[in-house]
Amino acid sequence: MAGHVDRHHSEILKQQRRFMIDLPENYHDNELTYPTLYVVDGDFQFQHVSAIVKNLTRMGKIPPMIVIGIATQGNADYIYQTTWAINNEADYGGAALFYQYVSAELVPHIDKNYRTNNNRIISGYSLGGLFTTFAMVQDGTPFNAFLAMSPSYWFDDYSASSSIAKYIAENNNKSASPLFLSVANEQGMGVGQVYESLKQLDIKDWPLGYQQYPNENHFSTALPALHDALSFLFAGYYEDGYELQAHKDVFDVLTTFAGKKQNYNGFRIEWLQAYKFSKYVFSSKQTDKIEEILTVVQQQFPDSVVNVSNYLAKGFNASKQFATAKDILERIKAQGEKTALWHHQYSLALTGLKQPELAEQAQTKAMALAQQQNLPMWQIWEMK
């Protein structure tokens, strides 16, 4: 099971509230900050959302992020907390207070206890999708990206369209926060109408996405829609290994990476990009440019220099150029010593240089760090 369940007391709601949290796989081997993805109706949605995030992160399609499941406490609580009052119906009406809890208590609690950045995404499905866009139109919302899968826009006589349009108009038509909407093969949801009305606003450079799933129903659409929503939000983040080969040289690749910093959440060279980048350096026979490469990476991607150096060292170890691997690793010793992969590659370099005792010490440290930092099993076994 992904992540863990935690609790805290809400002064706003006057009760204990649960939440789930799942950290990036390498969260504990660095001091970086991460975007957060808040998932409405965490009891129902959290496990598959955190799994999709983990998969897309491993594949280099999106950046690592902290996933938070906003738990509701039973179906009646879910319906009440995600809706606003209409016609004095007792089942509805908690959205405003619940939003206050999320924005004024849960978000600050997460920011205080975890290494977060200012990019906060909120996602929801069905009534959770309705609440997602409710959060969007609140003044001073802490969120800056909104993913609403099959949102229940039928609620309150399809008023969501006018409330979103009113909010944008009051903000001088300058809402640039990404919004993704989707709908399955389901009747009367009102999502298509809302999307068409928002398109008519003709807001320049507004990342507004819409996807239909005619082969999915209301229940089955949540997983594929969330996958596509994240792909929409982080469009342009991924760079395939074949695409790297089309570049003029290694510095052209780094220029392309630098351009991605303009995307939502910016860009870091994570493990898969670092691995592919190293493969490109070797396959294109540009290993004579290592000094220049590391200088550019240090200047433009200081948060990524450990990842890039570790994987370049891995390439030199694999090609039995152990002295070069050792030199690369020692350049980043102060930062690299905190990661298991650094110690593992250092051990391989020392083994190749016929220093078995030091190599064994480095490998022992690598495995101890891997356990201490709770690295995923695929990474641990690659270092055995």
Image (cartoon, rainbow, N blue to C red):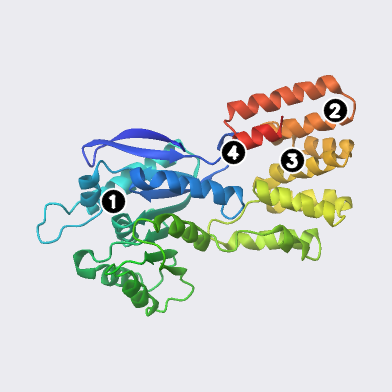
Badges 1 and 2: C-beta atoms under 8 Å apart?
Answer: no
Tell me which corner region of the image, top left, top right, bottom left or bottom right, holds residue 284.
bottom right
Q: Amino acid at mark 3?
A: Asn
Going 80% across and 66% down the picture, which residue do you hit?
248
Q: Secondary structure at mark 2?
A: helix
Name the N-terminal-most of marks 2 and 4.
4
- Say whether disc 3 or disc 4 marks the residue closer to the N-terminus: 4
Q: Which residue is mark 4?
A: 26
Of mark 3 and mark 2, the one earlier in the sequence is 3
Which residue is denoted by mark 2 in the rendering? Answer: 351
Residue type at the position of mark 2: Thr
Select label 1 or label 2 by which is in front. Answer: 2
Rendered residue at 73%/52% (across/down)? 276
Judged left or right of residue 89, residue 215 is right
- Identify the disc placed on residue 310: 3
Place of residue 318 in the rendered image (x, y in percent of width and height, measured from the top left): 83, 40
Residue 233 vertical position relative to residue 28 in the rendered view, above or below:
below
Task: Please rate how many residues cluster around mark 1, counting C-alpha atoms within 10 Å: few if below 14, some from 14 to 19, many from 20.
Answer: many
Q: Nearer the viewer, mark 3 or mark 2?
A: 2
For label 1, the SS is: helix
Indicate the secondary structure of the residue bearing disc 3: helix
Residue 188 versus residue 380 in the image, above or below:
below
Q: Closer to the camera, 91 or 111?
A: 91
Q: Amino acid at mark 1?
A: Tyr
Q: Residues within 10 Å of mark 2 (few under 14, many from 20)?
A: some
Residue that mark 1 sits on: 99
* Badge 4 or badge 1: first in the primary sequence: 4
Indicate which disc, 1 or 3, sits on the residue closer to the N terminus: 1
Q: Position of residue 241 (x, y in %)?
A: 72, 58
